[in-house]
Amino acid sequence: MKKVSVVFFALAIFFVGFVFAEEVFTLEQPAFITSAGQSPGALQMTVVCKMVKLDYTFEKLMTADDFDPQAYNCAIFVVGASGKGLGAAGIDIDEETARVVALAQKAKDNGLPIVLTHLEGAARRGASSDLLFNELSPFADALFIKEESDAADQMFSNIAEEKEIPIFFFEKTADLKNVISEVFGL
Amino acid sequence: MKRRILAFIFYILGVIAVCIIATVSFISMKINPVLNGPGVTETVKLSNWFEGIKNTNMDTNVYVFDSGVEGGSILILGGTHANEPAGILSAIVMLENIKVETGKVFIIPYANNSAISHNDAMEGAPEFYHIDLPDGSTRDFRFGSRRTNPTDQWPDPTLYNHQSGSTLGGGEVSNLNRCYPGDPDGYPTEKLAYAIVQLIKNEKVDIVIDMHESSPEYPVNDAIVFHQNAAELAITAQMMLEMDNIQIRLEESPVNLRGLSHREIGDSTDAMVLLLEVANPSQGRLRGKTDEDLVVTGLDKFYVQAAKEGKLYAPYDENGYPISLRVARHITTIDYIIQSWNMMSEKQILIDDIPSYENLINDIGSFLIEHEG
Ligand SMILES: [Zn+2]
């Protein structure tokens, strides 16, 4: 009787562990980070990554042609459209969308996990930001989203649910450190 | 006959009296009181760094806080636009309270001293506003103009060909924040910009903060505008502010917008440059009656209406946007920028007695020194 229950518990723990292991989303360094929309959000992401000492490379205007997928273990797209940022880069929203979609396609083709993040809150939600996010969401393996960005319409929650991908929420920008530390196992 | 001559003499005397009163009042506008605080180690004229503005109304007081302990340095500018009072008042509150323990601080409360010597009468702007002090007295502050006084610089050209190659509206040559990096042989306002840049270069200033206010309907509002070299500083400060539930926008300085402090000083010196904006209805186009009350309380019924319709870029309601809150935001942002700097640089800047956000909101008057007259 005792033996049976020990085996039973061992099996139970094994299966529970197995189930959880499947649900835990992890990423490996080094990470590649780019902007999708040229808002300051991408820079915020790099500052957070620097704080947790993540090994990353940031190129806000990286093109698919110049991108070397062999050099990285994941790609992070920080979505946020800024008219000023796009203007300063001398590109429009259509060119920016084409650039990031081609880049995501190349990353995906080379087996890199892709994360989309929106961290500038409701102030950075608008037609252009949403367009970029929706164009990129077919490539996403996970979402890192500021709670306030999702609060009004749950757009990000709905995308995660539809695609059955994990979504990591954080309240304040500084809390994104916890998400990155957790996912990268820092 | 005699009566007519007497009447004529009285009339002439009256005209002379009005002229004298107007002249005295006008000239008095050009003289600013010298401020002081417990931590000020030296008060120097800006012309110390560029002779070209000496004995002109463009010259202005620079308050120096030299700890004598080697460290970093920061220049804090108020009054780039003299019709944006929270920037000037923040500089004054800092200079009348802080003590510097490590490094060096420079504060210029009236960056465009000429612009504080007149106001925009056509905008219905008040000449003065006042803050109540704890002892029941008041402290009066002048409300100036966005631009240099025409008696110091006139006429402006039809178009302003900025040295970068950009063409700006002619009037912008009397807007200090379009004249950077300045020109030693240019218009008086360009000379002023040049003098400020000379101070930054000669004193090897590490951080420059330029304080402003902006209309609540303008998208760059309650914001830190940062030169790309100052990105980490701005972003870290934003995260710290957010931890205190103070929301602030981040805006990267566009490379093609020329003449502005954050672009030109950042490009032409080693300093990290940030510009702070806070929402102020007395700047805006939607405002109603423009008086001292509006400047101090920031409360305007048309802005309350605009906020309800979702047209504003600042969290605005029936509480207005009082100058105490605007100053608290500026000073707390500066505090966190310095803390961010200290996290990433060995050249420390340690300052004591920076008034706290809550205390400033509750009673800004208690951080002002009583002045006579
Ligand atoms: Zn301004």
Image (cartoon, coloured by chain):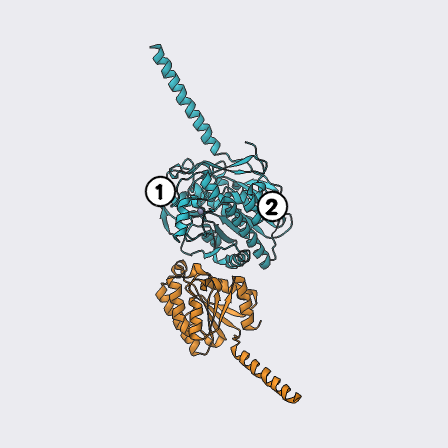
| Chain identifier, colour cyan | B
Q: Return the chain for callout 1.
A: B
- Outermost residue on the top side: it is B2
Q: Badge 1: few (under 14), some or many (20 or more) residues near its Cα, within 10 Å?
A: few
Question: Is residue B321 or residue B46 the one in the foreground?
Answer: B321
Q: Image height check: is B227 above or below B105?
A: below
- For the residue marked with disc 2, what is the amino acid? Ile
Which element is circle 1 on? loop
Question: Is residue A171 or residue B233 the one in the foreground?
Answer: A171
Answer left or right for A77 relative to B348. left
Q: Which residue is mark 1?
A: B157
**Could you say where residue A37 lies in the image, as x and y percent from the top left?**
41, 64
- Which mark, by number, is residue A32? none
Q: Residue at 51% of width from left, 47% of height from top? A: B325
- Outermost residue on the right side: it is A2
Q: Badge 2: few (under 14), some or many (20 or more) residues near its Cα, within 10 Å?
A: some
- Which mark, by number, is residue B98? 2
Question: Is residue B194 or residue B170 the one in the foreground?
Answer: B170
Asked whether mark 2 lies closer than 8 Å to ligand 1, one says no
| Chain identifier, colour orange | A
Of the 4 image quadrants, the one containing the N terminus of chain B is top left
Which element is circle 2 on? loop
Of the 4 image quadrants, the one containing the C terminus of chain B is top right
- For the residue marked with disc 1, what is the amino acid? Pro
Q: Return the chain for callout 2.
A: B
Tell me, yes or no, if residue A1 can be seen here: yes
Give the mark nearer the N terminus: 1 vs 2: 2
1 vs 2, front mark: 2
Tell me, yes or no, if residue B182 can be seen here: no
**Could you say where residue A58 lies in the image, as x and y percent from the top left?**
48, 67
